[in-house]
Image (tube, coloured by chain):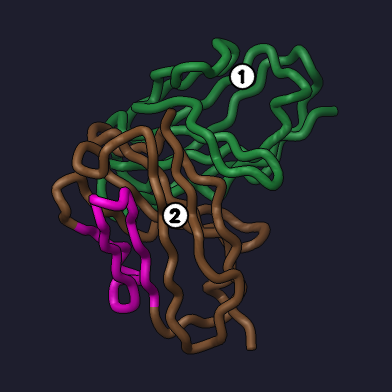
Amino acid sequence: DTVLTQSPALAVSPGERVTISCRASESVSTLMHWYQQKPGQQPTLLIYLASNLESGVPARFSGSGSGTDFTLTIDPVEADDTATYYCQQSWNDPWTFGGGTKLELK
Amino acid sequence: QVQLKESGPGLVQPSQTLSLTCTVSGFSLTSYNVHWVRQPPGKGLEWMGRMRYNGDTSYNSALKSRLSISRDTSKNQVFLKMNSLQTDDTGTYYCTRDPNYGGYSDYWGQGVMVTVSS
């Protein structure tokens, strides 16, 4: 299975720029996607195919990367962005998710 | 308006079988894939399997021996059955929609919490 590795947590101040990384154990081309999950809620899609912004998602969110290294950027961060962020690959089955990065605001 | 809603028992005894239903609206099961994803309390997400738009199924090999996914297109429902439940199967179970290209979930149900306990 393709293992996706994320940093477990980040803390930033509102208005700052934050980058959340996801590293794959093998190349997944651009078949990488990002989700946001707030406490008690289901995940929601932010970015698909590495860099495409899902409809309705603020332009403060962006994604980049290909192969094994991917980044989700939030610029500027707002208080409402407090959540856990997951990457997910669909290059091969089973789909796998990163362990999640919990974003906290200072 | 696309919606997915999971339903099923909140409590299952160890060694028993879990049966969940995902009822969808706003799209056709013959045009989109539907997946099942689960999340243990306080932990990350695990992909379980999919029902493709054409009726084919795929399963996570870690669960394949215990898992079955089926559907009733006339009722707009996808079903999950998993046997031999253990306590580490406790968690929230989600069904999701996948637009068939690229392999991501653009809509998620609200999830159903399942506790495995005697």
Residue tagged 2:
B37
Q: Which secondary structure, mark 2?
A: strand
The percent position of residue B42, horizontal first and vertical second, equals: 67, 58
Q: Which chain is brown?
A: B
Residue tagged 1:
A74
Looking at the picture, does residue A87 appear above or below residue B36?
above
The percent position of residue B112, horizontal first and vertical second, equals: 56, 58
Which residue occupies the foreground of this view, A58 or B19? B19
Looking at the picture, does residue A76 appear above or below residue B28?
above
Label 2 marks a residue whose chain is: B
Q: Say whether residue A65 is magenta.
A: no
| Residue B49 in view in this figure | yes
Residue under the point 30% across and 52% down: B75
How far is the residue under mark 1 from the one under mark 2? 26 Å
Q: Residue furthest right?
A: A106
The percent position of residue A19, horizontal first and vertical second, equals: 60, 24
Q: Which chain is green?
A: A
Q: Looking at the figure, which quarter contains the N terminus of chain A?
A: bottom left
Query: Would residue B49 appear left or right of B87 to someone viewing this image?
Result: left
Find residue A50 and name its label.
Answer: none
Q: Which secondary structure, mark 1?
A: strand
Tell me whether the residue at label 1 lies in contact with that at label 2, contact meaning CB atoms closer than 8 angstroms. no
Residue under the point 64% across and 13% down: A75
Look at the image and give the residue range highlighted in magenta: B57-82
Query: Would residue B12 appear left or right of A64 to someone viewing this image?
Result: right
Residue under the point 16% across and 55% down: B56
Callout count:
2
Q: Residues within 10 Å of mark 1 (few under 14, many from 20)?
A: many
Q: Residues within 10 Å of mark 2 (few under 14, many from 20)?
A: some
